[in-house]
Image (cartoon, rainbow, N blue to C red):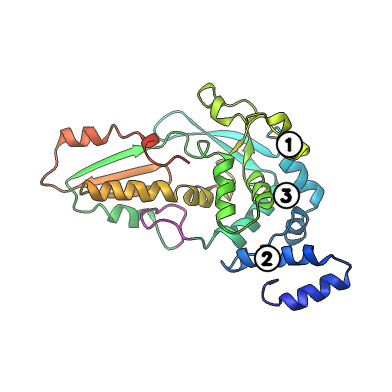
Amino acid sequence: MISASPHQYRAEGLARGRQEPVISAAISQASKAEALGLPAILTLGHLAFRTDVSHRYLRSVIAKRSGEFYREFHIKKRSGGLRRIVVPAPKLMAVQRWIVREILRERAVHPDCFAYVRRRSIVDCASRHVGAGWLLKLDIHDFFESIPERSVYRVYRSLGYQPLVSFELARICTRPWISPPDKREGSRTVANWWKRGIELYRRQFTGYLPQGAPTSPMLSNLVCRGLDEELSAFAAREGLVFTRYSDDLTFSGPKAGFSRDRAQLLGRIDIQDFQKV
């Protein structure tokens, strides 16, 4: 850990010809992440060293405007229709698994979130509603694809990583839209994208969480923590119990003091009225 022995780190840096302001900035950046028990990532080159993947490869993943680092296929949904699965290439998969293991796995999620959480299961989720008289289930349409790159960026910023590293981590964990659905094109288009940020990294469309990447489940929970808080508070005000299992939202009510009319009213909940991801 850099922050565990900053004097030694500074001495080694000076011995290698690094400038004092650069060393001080590195120690400051490292301390924010390491204070949360996370690995320091100072630059993309530093991440390449830690993951044993070339800097050139990581940079190409971040810069690409197409989805060529993912293999796409479809599986049937139990409810009908097809679910799109996008699996990262082996080398990218290895980097994402490192991110899961070293950064995401132990991050706290909301108590009412039960999917993709160690020591919590779908049985634990269902147990929260045992004895209820009414059960209302809602589904977030295209759950993973609805989570944009900017929300993933905010997760990494909240974990103490500096802006550029957070941006690069977000890009590594998202797949670029090539042609977003018409209803989402506006929200996925980067304003003045041709003149913003690092030229190599410029894209017209932001990315999304791919269903099939090992980082997506845990990132979705961290992105949705604010939403979980608001829906949990809403349920408490209404005298209900709330849980979320990935894209499945469940509200349960007591046997007495509830009605079909009230259930139908709750069924018209618009997630857009709560915190956006």
Dominant secondary structure of the residues highlighted in magenta in the image: loop
Q: Distance between the residues labelled 2 and 1?
A: 31 Å
* Residue 85 place in picture, x, y as percent: 56, 37
In the rendered image, which residue does mark 1 sit on? 64
* Residue 74 place in picture, x, y as percent: 55, 33
Q: Quadrant of residue 48?
A: bottom right
* Residue 186 place in picture, x, y as percent: 55, 25
From the viewer's perspective, tell me whether residue 8 is left or right of residue 155: right
**Do tag 1 and tag 3 residues touch (Cβ < 8 Å)?**
no
Q: Residue 28 carries which label?
A: 2
Q: In this view, does 185 lie above or below 43?
A: above
Earlier-in-chain disc, 2 versus 1: 2
Q: Name the residue: 67% across, 76% down.
A: 4
Report the mark closest to the observer, 1 or 3. 1
Mark 2 element type:
helix
In the rendered image, which residue does mark 3 sit on? 91
Earlier-in-chain disc, 1 versus 3: 1
Q: Name the residue: 82% across, 70% down.
A: 13
Q: Quadrant of residue 47?
A: bottom right
In magenta, the rendered stretch is 108-118
In this view of the protein, can residue 52 be seen by the observer? Answer: no
Amino acid type of the residue that numbered disc 2 sits on in the rendered structure:
Ser
Asked whether 38 falls inside the magenta stretch, the response is: no
From the viewer's perspective, tell me whether residue 268 is left or right of residue 92: left
Amino acid type of the residue that numbered disc 3 sits on in the rendered structure:
Lys
* Residue 133 place in picture, x, y as percent: 16, 46
From the viewer's perspective, tell me whether residue 147 is left or right of residue 2: left
